[in-house]
Image (cartoon, grey):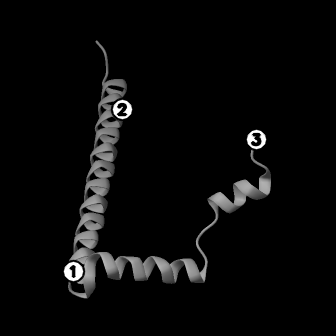
Amino acid sequence: MLSLNALMLLLSMPGGTEWILIVVAILILFGGRKIPEFMRGIGRGIREFNDAKSNVKKEIEEGMNEKENKTSSTTSSPTH
């Protein structure tokens, strides 16, 4: 069983030297010319994800408003 300290080490964010090693590894793998294309692709992906998320949220809110309007109109209509 892992101790609390070992668990914290596994889950902690990388420090300064780890980030430098990560950047160097990315430069070696992708090269200096491919990194802007890579970042643009990541930006497009994030933008598409946020657009899809806002569209789903808007559709859910519209559906909830429709349901509220239908229930309020059926309860407020007089019965003969």
Foreground mark, 2 or 3, reads 3
Q: Which kind of residue does numbered mark 3 sit on?
A: Met
* Among the 4 quarters of the image, the one containing residue 35: bottom left
Q: Nearer the viewer, mark 2 or mark 1?
A: 1
Residue 52 visible in the snapshot: yes
Residue 1 tag number: 3
When asked about the image quadrant of residue 45, the answer is bottom left
x and y, in percent, of residue 50 in the image: 31, 61
Which of 5 and 54 lies nearest the eye of the viewer? 5
Q: Tell me if residue 20 comes above or below residue 59 in the rendering.
A: below
Q: Which mark is residue 34?
A: 1
Q: Nearer the viewer, residue 72 or 20?
A: 20
Q: Which mark is residue 72?
A: 2
Query: Which amino acid type corresponds to the residue marked 1 in the rendered image?
Result: Lys
x and y, in percent, of residue 60 in the image: 32, 43
> Is 7 on the left or on the right of 57, as rendered?
right
Residue at 21% x, 80% y: name it. Answer: 34
The total of numbered circles placed on residues is 3
3D distance between C-alphas at marks 1 and 3: 43 Å
Q: Image quarter for residue 77?
A: top left
